[in-house]
Amino acid sequence: MMNKHYLPIIIFFLVIPIFYIGLDRNKSELPSPLIGKEMPKFSLPSLQNSNNIIDNSNFDYEIFLLNVWATWCSGCLEEHPFLMQLSKSNQIPIIGLNWRDNKNDAIDWLENYGDPYNLIANDKLGRVAIDWGVYGAPESFLVDSNGIIIHKHLGPLNEKIWEQDFVSLIRDVNNK
Amino acid sequence: MKKIYYFILFATFSPIVFAIDTGLAFEDSKLQERYEKLISEVRCLVCQNQSIKSSNVFLAVDLRNEIKIMIGKGKSNNEIGDYLVERYGEFILYRPRYTGYSLFLWIAPLALMLGGLFVVMRVIKSKSN
């Protein structure tokens, strides 16, 4: 009979970790349902030359990073030096998705700060961004050689995040 | 001094104007009603505590537009919901669906209540014996 009095205490200690995990979760960062799925089909003009069309066929059989950016996005400027560094290291092609931006501003921006992108698609209307589930720039998607999205990072990239979350995934894909 | 009074008067009574979609999305009132109900149930992920109906962030504008197009194409509410969930996850809908983890969340309170009721009944029974 004595055991019964301990029951609420036991329940209390069982529940605490659940609440603790709940508190710790970053609610502004949502897991993307697109992870593990094929990248959305798209076809957009290139930012620099609107006669060039960039679509899924540009990325066949190659792992790449899709980086969503815009000149109105302050986090994009923050991560820019890292993208420049990444582009120089030739680890991975970087594809830019210029989201809901002014074309001339974007081109000026690249002239001022440097252009780390292999290709930049101009998503003026933001419809492709919706297909990728984009809701805040910068966002970066890692797409493997089969066209499957294997990772998404929300917010500015930096060396630490890259080493932590991207490098081993890229190694795994390249070793396959 | 008078100027200041007028200023305060007008400042406090000036109507707050939100320029959210001028005009109606649909001429058909039934479609318009459906559209308005739908967009009031979609979360604006940038602002999180607002629906895309009451937000003017451009992502909300884009999503409203996308929903408008889909209604125009004759898509059902379910299809539109699927479209959003496929891209943004369950969180984008204010009313979660009855699947997976959210099904558990729907059922759990009921199950807990029934469990509690069962315990109470047993206690009463044993006491009265």
Image (spheres, rainbow, N blue to C red):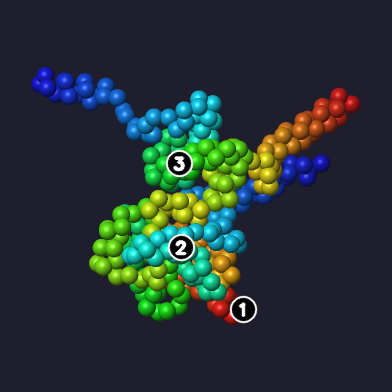
Q: Nearer the viewer, mark 1 or mark 3?
A: 3
- x and y percentages locating residue A159 in the rendered image: 41, 71
At x 35%, y 57%, the residue is A70
Amino acid residing under circle 3: Asn
> Which quarter of the rendered picture does the N terminus of chain A lie within?
top right
Q: Nearer the viewer, mark 3 or mark 2?
A: 3
Residue beneath disc 2: A140
- x and y percentages locating residue B9 in the rendered image: 21, 20
- x and y percentages locating residue B117 in the rendered image: 77, 30
> Could you tell me which secondary element the residue under label 2 belongs to?
strand
CB within 8 Å, label 1 to label 3: no
> Could you tell me which secondary element the residue under label 1 belongs to?
loop
Q: Quadrant of residue A93?
A: bottom left
Residue beneath disc 1: A176
Report in which chain the residue with disc 2 lies.
A
**In-front residue for pair A14/A5:** A14
Residue beneath disc 3: B65
Q: Residues within 10 Å of mark 1 (few under 14, many from 20)?
A: few
**In-front residue for pair B20/B115:** B20
Amino acid residing under circle 1: Lys
Separation of marks 3 and 2 at Cα, in angstroms: 25 Å
At x 40%, y 72%, the residue is A118
Q: Residues within 10 Å of mark 3 (few under 14, many from 20)?
A: some
- N-terminal-most mark, 1 or 2: 2
> Which quarter of the rendered picture does the C terminus of chain A lie within?
bottom right
Amino acid residing under circle 2: Ser
